[in-house]
Image: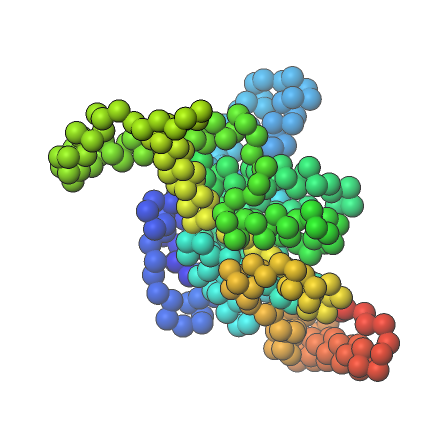
């Protein structure tokens, strides 16, 4: 994990805005993640305060007081900044959680890095992705799990993520919850678009005509800028200038060859930028009845994604969660508190074991959450 420097919210530059510092021991890693978690929650509070002040300004029409409040709320505009309306994270930093976080962060920092997180619901997969994306300075676009979530809304979110990755050259994490996959399942569902995106770097029919023209113009402008830079550094061969003055070969009834080559080069540049900057993170539960079917039907999920299996949390992790939950409760002294927390962990493990026994016996399996 890149340790926070003086500018923890500094924008990305080159390989990253934060200088990489090796963390040698687990205590230092825990302290590093705790500082990032505090910075994330501060950013969430600042973004929500800014959004609330803007809403008050629109509702009341007041200028003076609200304008002064807007000036005092300083919100960074780095790509990793959480959007308004995000809830703060309350995480328990135990060893297994930190190991999974380092894996997620390592994948998100790689070009074309995609993740498939397997585990039970409530195991903290989404929270790990949110803080991991913040540490890696990636913008987060998450699919909704609301019952009224529709395919046009998903396409709008996917289009926004693709344009930010390709046109704005930002690092973007596309987070797919299993609830949204269940809502929009089928041949034309979310996974069909994700499968295309992972295989080819684009989704057929996602961008409109105006967006395609804007993207093509932006990619051609980048190509011209690179060619001018190469000419200035004399890396272009001399015969290339002569060849560019020759008339282009024409195709009967169609555009010239040069225009076709330029369009193809522009599209390939766009696809490369999207594939390098957009990181797909899917969350699936192996206990789901659709798990195997989805992996067989959409092989890109395993061909292009790094699989990270979140096993059930061990007893020390459950005790740490109980200690965090009972932090403000009056349960006696330190020894009594530890006994209560250990009892909570044992009760949870017994419930999980009973559910597994029932599933093995053919009973309806009830998936238990660690939340």
Q: Position of residue 74 (x, y in %)?
A: 48, 35
- Above or below for 359 versus 66: below
Q: State how the image is colored.
A: rainbow
Q: Position of residue 66 (x, y in %)?
A: 58, 24
Q: For the point 59% across and 37% down, which residue is it? A: 205
- Name the foreground residue: 24 vs 103: 103
**Residue 299 in sight from this viewpoint:** yes
Q: Is residue 368 left or right of residue 129?
A: right
- Above or below for 368 versus 39: below
Quarter in which the N terminus is drawn: bottom left
**Residue 76 in sight from this viewpoint:** no
Quarter in which the C terminus is drawn: bottom right
Q: For the point 70% across and 41% down, which residue is it? A: 151
Q: For the point 46% across and 60% down, which residue is it? A: 107
The number of numbered badges drawn on the structure is 0
- Name the foreground residue: 229 vs 7: 229
Q: For the point 41% across and 42% down, which residue is it? A: 268
- Name the foreground residue: 176 vs 291: 291
Q: Is residue 9 left or right of residue 88?
A: left
Q: Is residue 63 left or right of residue 278?
A: right
- Name the foreground residue: 206 vs 11: 206
Q: Position of residue 166 (x, y in %)?
A: 45, 39
Q: Position of residue 196 (x, y in %)?
A: 57, 49
């Amino acid at each position: 994990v890149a340790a926070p420097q003086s500018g923890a919210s500094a924008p990305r530059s080159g390989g990253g805005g934060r200088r990489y510092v090796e963390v040698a021991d687990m205590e230092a890693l825990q302290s590093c993640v705790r500082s990032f978690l505090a910075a994330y929650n501060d950013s969430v509070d600042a973004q929500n305060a800014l959004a609330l002040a803007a809403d008050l300004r629109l509702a009341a029409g007041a200028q003076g007081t609200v304008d002064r409040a807007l000036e005092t709320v300083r919100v960074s505009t780095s790509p990793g900044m959480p959007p308004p309306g995000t809830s703060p994270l309350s995480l328990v930093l135990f060893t297994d959680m930190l190991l999974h976080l380092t894996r997620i962060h390592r994948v998100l920092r790689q070009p074309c890095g995609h993740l498939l997180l397997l585990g039970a619901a409530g195991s903290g997969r989404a929270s790990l992705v949110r803080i991991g994306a913040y540490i890696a300075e990636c913008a987060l676009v998450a699919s909704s799990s609301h019952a009224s979530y529709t395919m046009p809304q998903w396409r709008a979110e996917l289009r926004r993520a693709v344009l930010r990755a390709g046109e704005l050259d930002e690092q973007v994490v596309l987070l797919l919850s299993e609830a949204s996959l269940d809502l929009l399942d089928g041949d034309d569902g979310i996974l069909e678009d994700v499968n295309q995106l992972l295989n080819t770097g684009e989704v057929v029919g996602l961008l409109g005509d105006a967006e395609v023209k804007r993207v093509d113009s932006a990619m051609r402008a980048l190509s011209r800028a690179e060619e001018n830079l190469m000419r200035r550094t004399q890396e272009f061969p001399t015969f290339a200038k002569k060849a560019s003055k020759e008339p282009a070969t024409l195709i009967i009834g169609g555009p010239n060859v040069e225009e076709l080559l330029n369009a193809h080069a522009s599209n390939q540049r766009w696809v490369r930028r999207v594939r390098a900057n957009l990181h797909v993170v899917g969350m699936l539960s192996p206990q789901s009845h659709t798990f195997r079917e989805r992996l067989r039907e959409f092989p890109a999920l395993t061909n292009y994604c790094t699989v990270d299996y979140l096993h059930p949390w061990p007893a020390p992790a459950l005790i740490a969660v109980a200690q965090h939950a009972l932090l403000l409760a009056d349960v006696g002294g330190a020894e009594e508190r530890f006994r209560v927390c250990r009892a909570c962990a044992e009760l949870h493990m017994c419930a999980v074991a009973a559910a597994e026994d029932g599933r093995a016996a053919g009973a309806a399996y009830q998936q238990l959450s660690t939340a």
